[in-house]
Image (tube, rainbow, N blue to C red):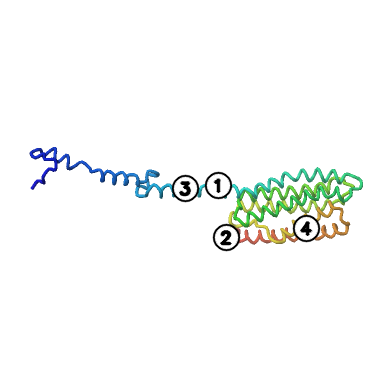
Amino acid sequence: MTPACPSGCRGRANSCKGAAAAPSPSSRLVHIAESTSVGVIGLGRRSRPVGIAIAEAKHDSHDEEGAVSSTKLADIPNALSLLRIGLVPVFLYVAHEVGASANATTVPRLRPAAVLVAIGASDVLDGYLARRYGWSTYGGAVLDAIADKLAQLSALALLALVELPSFSPVPLWFLLLVVFRDLLLGMGWLLSVVHPGKVSVEHELHGRVATLSMFGLVLAIVLGLPEVVSATILVLTSTLIVYSVLAYAVRTVRELRPASDSQ
């Protein structure tokens, strides 16, 4: 049975069907609301309202900003290593200027000592940040090693090879001992590249103590402390370096032995 046409258009079935098919104003409002709630932002999120999609977009943006900030902070140890490299020529210049004078007093000696302390502090700080926050990278470790060796060898070479009346000289054999140690450490690094996972290049406590003792030696000489103090530190540092070299050599041989036996 055909329902009665509300407009009285009996006999005109087609027009009546058209009138029945037309959406009412209320249904149009529902359709607009539904289409507005569809995720216009992000085609993959059609079922999410616009408000949620905007909130998620803001959250993603904050995550990206946080990742960028974290990346920038992770560059701080490398920046400190570069700063340490830049301070090396400053120390050499100031130390040579003060040491070349006949009788340097305490106040002028504080200038190279301050630069030396800044070099040591940057080394400690970048190592702490890299370990504490997981900012250690292979490139950063290489840059840190370059900065350390450059600072140590430059300071020792200045005190061993250049005649500076106000500074006690470092014996040439001590400089050669440090160079020999660094060459062996370099060979260990090459072995770690050739045999990845077999040879470790991590510094141990005796190596850190030897480096700290060497820093104390240079600082004692620059500050003009009594020669008995610098001589005592020299003997202690030499002993630590010899022990450190032997310990690293024994460890490397032990790490390579299983690989050589299996071949």
Helix, strand or loop under label 2 = helix
Which labelled disc corresponds to residue 213?
4
Structural distance between the alpha carbons of marks 2 and 1: 46 Å
- Quarter holding residue 237: bottom right
Q: Amino acid at mark 1?
A: Val
Q: Residue at x 68, y 45 (%)?
A: 82
- Judged by depth in the image, the label closer to the viewer, 1 or 3, is 3
Cα–Cα gap, marks 4 and 1: 39 Å
Residue at the image position 81 percent from the left and 44 percent from the top: 94
> What percent of the width, then of the height, locates residue 40?
37, 43
- Residue 66: where, in percent of width, then height? 54, 49
Question: Which quadrant holds the C terminus?
Answer: bottom right
Residue drawn at 72 percent across, 61 percent down: 206
Q: In the rendering, which numbered label is found on residue 58?
A: 3
Between circles 2 and 4, the one closer to the viewer is 4
Considering the numbered disc 4 on the image, is that residue within a helix, a strand or a loop?
helix
Do the residues bearing badges 4 and 3 touch, measured as CB atoms within 8 Å?
Answer: no
- Res 262 label: 2
How much space separates mark 2 and mark 4, taking CA atoms? 40 Å
Q: Nearer the viewer, mark 4 or mark 1?
A: 1
Residue type at the position of mark 4: Ser
Where 258 falls versus 167 (above or below)? Answer: below
Q: Which residue is mark 1?
A: 68
